[in-house]
């Protein structure tokens, strides 16, 4: 590097930027910015950020330019860069002639990989401009946008280690790639019509390829055909949402009768035609991560999200989507998986049986990843599924918990994720699905190996669930590595603490409500109040236990839970009140279930809050006899409560504090609901009052725990808190009682967060007791 000979009067400084600024186009951005502000020196990657040396001719110039440089740094940073802090220190003047990006010494630094990023405005303009060489090119991208996590094979992040390796850059692309002032400087997936990936459209029946892929695909969708379209993390199944036959056929092929389907809309205006959109929701919808956002319906499209008052929308996130949606306006875009299998990333994974045509391309997907799904509650995201666009975003671990070792947490079983810990950061994988399905377990292993390669990660310690029968537990046992086991609801609580950087010194009230988790006593837990810090917990209160007639079957057939709650509330069989909703169940079946519970046969006890929702939803007459997907019955109840007026009076409930743990009982609630049903009160009112009751009950328990044990922070977690109404209502009541409320914002509160919580526990325990031998 050349240095200027003269000018000892010059001034220099060192700027360190901490945060997620690697692998997101930050150094080229800094380069362009330095040029613009006439600053010289260099930029390089360091352990947890970038380091800059900046110089100007004299101190006055440096001061003024630095100031505007720093404000541009924050205001114009690449879409996925996250600046945590900036440090400015004086440095000695060297006399650089220009500004350079310099290579960092390969050390123990932890290089982050960016999530996939939606097409940026500049690229979008290019594909719409007939004068550009990338006009209508479906694989246009730059350093600010394009595929990342889904195409990277290993480190360092360089074209030969991505699925773009086989595409040789043409001279034009090469020139852009090598020009530091170009928007495509070191954009690894850089491509153009001359040298990049190409589309292909195939008829699944005949195997024949069709010409004019884009135009033909658009015409086929308009004609009611179902297309499998390759995106970033896998294939979507796409059809016209207004064509009832197409939607019905899609549901039939996917074996989904009622599960909501996501929509992709051309733009915000199209979304607003069908749904209400707040500013906060709009912000998420148009963000570079482009999640599916659940929005309140304005104009319902039959068959898309039946029985629910919200519907999921996303905007196009690749040039291919933009080109299709420009013409089509609105399509169904649901992930193309066979029932209970992960999203397909390759045509060979059985897509032909799911679609009439396949619109594919020759850029392979390295890592499959579903669309992320969220809703906005109290202005902040609430994730139902965290995957594409967010993974593998790193999470800083509180300094008190950082350790010089590498740990891998395997999660639980349903809605699984993997979390890894290295060099002060935790990284959580994309949603992997339910691992009781063998194909999903293969996806788990596939992802585990991908994470190892991507982050040069070699675990020294594993963490898994307490459940002795989970595949993840067996995996830990067979690994030959030391491992810890963590109780499910405790892990739920810890995930939230880690995300918020909660200090290890204080205790919190972990309110962990979900369907099922293996308890310390081997029981089926799911309505838990834990007094917890990172290394231990006490189960201070729980929901009153009821039988789970038939075990897993009770979770699929809500009427079984309705019977269990009725029997608990009213006693013997001949005392049971007549409830309309139960009339549709065969009397012999009902009698059989009641006897089963009385005899305590195949009826383990559960404190599950999810099952309480099932029971109430069924009693109110809105749950199906057999659910198609988890939380279907509770979601319908929530939808009804949201649609009904607010300000519902709670039903009675009881809290017994002379037992250990304390018992929160909804026996009085069930009795009151039955009385209301008798009087012909509407299901919407019952749904509303039930939500109010639960929120009030939770707040009362939390207040008592706070008085008794001094904890001042409540953590709301578990899948039950995906319920907007319950989350808002409970939060308000807890805050009114003077408690600080924490909940997941960057992760889902459902079982996807288990692995992150497990990691937190392992860190705390190793800190306390040392590394296990
Ligand atoms: Zn771009
Ligand atoms: Zn090219």
Image: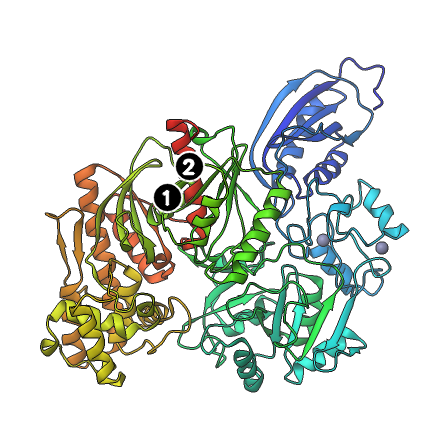
Where residue 494 appears, as percent x and y from the top left, is: 38, 42
| Residue 499 visible at all | no
Circles 2, 1 touching at the beta carbon (< 8 Å):
yes
Residue that mark 2 sits on? 762
Reading the image, the residue beneath label 1 is: 486
**Label 1 neighbourhood size at 10 Å, few (<14), some (14-19), many (20+)?**
many
Is residue 105 or residue 466 the one in the foreground? 466
Q: Which residue is located at x 64 percent, y 27 percent?
A: 15
Helix, strand or loop status at disc 1: strand
Between residue 158 and residue 206, name the one nearer to us. Answer: 206
Let me know if residue 630 appears in the view.
yes
In the image, 7: left or right of 455? right
Residue 286 appears in which quarter of the rendering?
bottom right
Percent from the top left, x then y, of residue 465?
39, 48
Q: Secondary structure at mark 2?
A: helix
Of the pair 555 and 569, the residue shown nearer to us: 555
């Amino acid at each position: 590097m050349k240095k200027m000979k003269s000018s000892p009067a010059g001034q220099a400084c060192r700027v360190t930027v901490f945060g997620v600024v690697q692998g997101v186009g930050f150094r080229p951005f800094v380069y362009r910015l330095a040029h613009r502000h006439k600053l010289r020196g260099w930029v390089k990657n360091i352990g947890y950020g970038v380091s800059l040396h900046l110089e100007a001719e004299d101190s006055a110039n440096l001061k003024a330019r630095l100031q505007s440089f720093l404000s541009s740094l924050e205001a114009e940073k690449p879409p996925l860069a996250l600046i945590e802090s900036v440090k400015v220190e004086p440095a000695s003047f060297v006399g650089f002639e220009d500004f350079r990006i310099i290579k960092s010494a390969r050390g123990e630094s932890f290089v982050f990989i960016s999530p996939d990023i939606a097409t940026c405005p500049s690229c979008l303009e290019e594909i719409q401009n007939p004068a550009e060489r990338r006009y209508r090119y479906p694989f246009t991208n730059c350093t600010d946008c394009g595929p990342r996590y889904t195409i990277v094979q290993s480190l360092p992040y360089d074209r030969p280690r991505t699925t773009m390796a086989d595409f040789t850059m043409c001279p034009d692309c090469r020139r852009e790639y090598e020009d530091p002032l170009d928007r495509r400087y070191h954009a690894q997936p850089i491509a153009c019509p001359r040298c990049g990936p190409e589309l292909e459209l195939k008829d699944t029946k005949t195997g024949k390829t069709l010409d004019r892929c884009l135009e033909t695909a658009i015409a086929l969708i308009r004609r009611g055909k179902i297309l499998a379209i390759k995106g970033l993390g896998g294939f979507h199944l796409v059809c016209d949402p207004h064509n009832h036959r197409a939607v019905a056929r899609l549901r039939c092929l996917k074996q989904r009768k009622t599960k909501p389907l996501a929509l992709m809309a051309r733009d915000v205006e199209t979304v607003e035609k069908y749904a209400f959109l707040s500013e906060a929701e709009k912000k998420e919808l148009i963000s570079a991560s482009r999640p599916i956002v659940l929005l309140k319906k304005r104009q319902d499209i039959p068959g898309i999200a039946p029985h629910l008052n919200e519907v999921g929308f996303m905007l196009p996130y690749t040039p291919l989507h933009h080109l299709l949606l420009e013409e089509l306006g609105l399509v169904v875009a649901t992930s193309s998986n066979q029932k209970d299998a992960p999203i397909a990333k390759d045509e060979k994974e059985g897509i032909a049986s799911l679609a009439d045509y396949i619109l594919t391309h020759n850029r392979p997907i390295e890592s499959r990843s579903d669309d992320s799904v969220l809703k906005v509650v109290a202005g902040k995201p609430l994730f139902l599924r965290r995957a594409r666009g967010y993974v593998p975003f790193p999470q800083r671990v509180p300094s008190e918990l950082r350790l010089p070792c590498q740990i891998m947490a395997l999660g639980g079983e349903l809605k699984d994720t993997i979390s890894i810990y290295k060099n002060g950061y935790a990284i959580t994988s994309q949603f992997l699905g339910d691992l009781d399905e063998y194909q999903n377990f293969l996806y788990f292993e596939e992802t585990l190996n991908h994470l190892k390669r991507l982050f040069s990660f070699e675990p020294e310690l594993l963490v898994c669930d307490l459940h002795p029968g989970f595949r993840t537990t067996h995996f830990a046992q067979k690994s030959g590595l030391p491992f810890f086991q963590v109780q499910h609801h405790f892990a739920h609580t810890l995930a939230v603490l880690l995300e918020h950087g909660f200090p290890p010194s204080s205790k919190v009230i972990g309110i962990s409500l979900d369907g099922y988790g293996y308890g310390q006593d081997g029981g089926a837990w799911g309505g838990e109040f834990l007094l917890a810090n990172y290394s231990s917990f006490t189960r201070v209160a729980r929901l009153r236990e009821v039988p789970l007639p038939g075990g897993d079957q009770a979770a699929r057939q809500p009427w079984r839970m309705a019977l269990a709650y009725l029997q608990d509330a009213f006693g013997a069989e001949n005392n049971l009140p007549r409830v309309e909703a139960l009339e549709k169940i065969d009397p012999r079946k009902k009698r059989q279930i009641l006897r089963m519970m009385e005899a305590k046969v195949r009826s383990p006890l559960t404190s599950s809050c999810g099952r309480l929702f099932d029971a109430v939803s069924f009693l109110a007459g809105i749950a199906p006899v057999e659910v198609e997907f988890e939380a279907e019955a509770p979601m319908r109840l929530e939808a009804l409560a949201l649609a009904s007026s607010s300000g519902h009076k709670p039903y009675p409930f009881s809290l017994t504090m002379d037992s250990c743990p304390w018992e929160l009982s909804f026996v009085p609630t069930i009795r009151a609901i039955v009385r209301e049903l008798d009087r012909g009160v509407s299901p919407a009112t019952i749904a509303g009052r039930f939500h109010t009751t639960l929120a009030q009950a939770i707040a009362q328990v939390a207040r008592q725990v706070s008085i008794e044990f001094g904890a001042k922070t409540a953590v709301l977690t578990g899948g039950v808190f995906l319920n907007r109404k319950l989350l808002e209502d409970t939060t308000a009541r807890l805050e009114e009682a003077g408690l600080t409320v924490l909940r997941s914002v960057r992760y889902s509160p459902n079982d996807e967060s288990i692995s992150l919580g497990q990691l937190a526990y392992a860190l705390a325990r190793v800190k306390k007791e040392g590394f296990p031998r």
